[in-house]
Every structure is written in structure tokens, then in C-alpha cells.
């Protein structure tokens, strides 16, 4: 058993231009966890900004890969190998255009669903079986250019929703660590506010 029970890796792109965009919800969730648990994301390891926290009695490494989104797997794989973790020791947090805006979805496994960062993590780890938290960003209307949409800054109304949403995302990750993925799924998989259908 390595030093950490989990690496919580939030996906995003480094730099101020990308900070407040849908594609950086993974980064923002990890930052919220760091804030809650007095962890400083200041050390660089395996091309990621990392900080240590104790969550649910477990020692956890919080990580924001700095490789840019499409190469996120290189950083995650480096941390997994360095700390001798299996894929079940990774909790991946990322935005998902297939889920309604504001929704949360915990899964034990799954495909990348067209998300380049997740594709790279799956490729580098050699498996689709690892826990993840997906944060829905589908705005509820057709998106003509998805690449442009995920990198566009949040609108002011979206920024207002961000605080409670990141708190809910941090709660979900804490629950995954403290209670296990199955219990966390029951407690935290939720519909977006105002939607009636259950997300896939």
C-alpha cells in the first residue's frame, strides 16, 4: 500500500485564460476540496499541481494535471505509479457535455464519451474501470461548436450557480472516499435543478 489511498485528479487546462470555463470544472472542484481541507496545491509532481489532504480518515493526494487537457493521462499515470495505486485509487473529476447543466454523476467505470482528457487517462491507465465524478455542462440547447463552448468563459448567471455546484461536487468526492463509490452514487447522483429526466 502506497502513501495515499486516493489520487483525486480534476481535469482542466492550466493558465488564467481557461480558469473560469466549463472544461475546468475538474480543476475547480479539486481547488474547492483543497480549500475545505486546508491543502495547498503548490507542489509539482508528475506534471501536476498537488496537495495533501485527509478526507474521511484517508490520506488523499489532490491533483490538477498541468499537461493541458488532451494529455492528462500522462500526469495521472505518473502519480498512480509513483504512489503505487491501482486504477481504483483514482477519482477522476471532469465536465461532461452529455449530462444536463448542473447535474452530478458518480460512476465506477465507463467510456470517455468523447472527452479527450478522459480518453487519454483511459489510454494511459489501460482500463476504463476507475471511479469518476462527471459534472454536466449541457446547456439545454444545441451546441454548434463543442470545443468552443467548453473553453468559453462562464456567463454571469452560470457563475452564480457555480458556488453551490462546486460544494455539491466536493461533497460527492468526500462521500466517495469516506463511504465508498456505491453509497456515494445513491446519495449524490442527482438531476440538474429543473430537469425531470434521469441522466444516463
Image: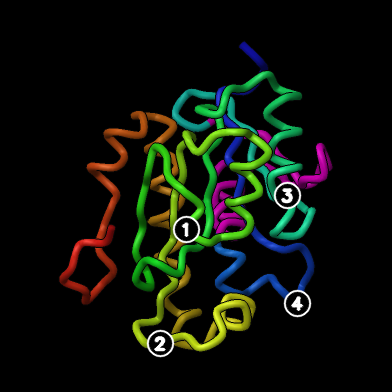
Q: Choose the circle earlier in sequence order: 1 or 3.
A: 3
Percent x, y for residue 94?
53, 56
Q: Which secondary structure lies at badge 4?
A: loop
Q: Nearer the viewer, mark 2 or mark 3?
A: 2
| Disc number placed over residue 60 in the picture, else none | none
Q: Are marks 4 and 2 in contact (CB under 8 Å)?
A: no
Q: CA distance from mark 2 to mark 3?
A: 30 Å
Q: Quadrant of residue 24?
A: bottom right
Percent x, y for residue 93?
52, 50
Identify the residue under disc 1.
113
Q: For residue 35: magenta? A: yes
Task: Judge the density around disc 3: few (<14), some (14-19), many (≥20) Cα neighbours within 10 Å.
Answer: many
Identify the residue under disc 2.
142
Percent x, y for residue 144?
51, 88
| Disc number placed over residue 17 in the picture, else none | 4
Task: Judge the density around disc 1: few (<14), some (14-19), many (≥20) Cα neighbours within 10 Å.
Answer: few
Q: Choose the circle earlier in sequence order: 4 or 2.
A: 4
Q: How many marks?
A: 4
Q: For residue 79: magenta? A: no
Identify the residue under disc 3.
65
Q: Nearer the viewer, mark 1 or mark 3?
A: 1
Q: Nearer the viewer, mark 4 or mark 2?
A: 2
Residue stretch rendered in magenta on the structure: 26-54
Q: CA distance from mark 3 to mark 4?
A: 16 Å
Amino acid at each position: 500500500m502506497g502513501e495515499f489511498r486516493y489520487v483525486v485528479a480534476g481535469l482542466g487546462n492550466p493558465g488564467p485564460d481557461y480558469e473560469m470555463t466549463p472544461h475546468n470544472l475538474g480543476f475547480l472542484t479539486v481547488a474547492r476540496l483543497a480549500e475545505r481541507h486546508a491543502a495547498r496545491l503548490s507542489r509539482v509532481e508528475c506534471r501536476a499541481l498537488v496537495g495533501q489532504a485527509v478526507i474521511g480518515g484517508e490520506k488523499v493526494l489532490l491533483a490538477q494535471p498541468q499537461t493541458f487537457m488532451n494529455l492528462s493521462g500522462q500526469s495521472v499515470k505518473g502519480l498512480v505509479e509513483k504512489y503505487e495505486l491501482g486504477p481504483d485509487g483514482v477519482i477522476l473529476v471532469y465536465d461532461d457535455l452529455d449530462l444536463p447543466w448542473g447535474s452530478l454523476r458518480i460512476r465506477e467505470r465507463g467510456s470517455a464519451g468523447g472527452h479527450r482528457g478522459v480518453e487519454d487517462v483511459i489510454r494511459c491507465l489501460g482500463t476504463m474501470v476507475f471511479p469518476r465524478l462527471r459534472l454536466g455542462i449541457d446547456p439545454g440547447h444545441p451546441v454548434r461548436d463543442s470545443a468552443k463552448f467548453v473553453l468559453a468563459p462562464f456567463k454571469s448567471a452560470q457563475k452564480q450557480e457555480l458556488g453551490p455546484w462546486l460544494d455539491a461536487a466536493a461533497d460527492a468526492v468526500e462521500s466517495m472516499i469516506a463511504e465508498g463509490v456505491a453509497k456515494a452514487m445513491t446519495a449524490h447522483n442527482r438531476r440538474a435543478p429543473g430537469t425531470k429526466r434521469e441522466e444516463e
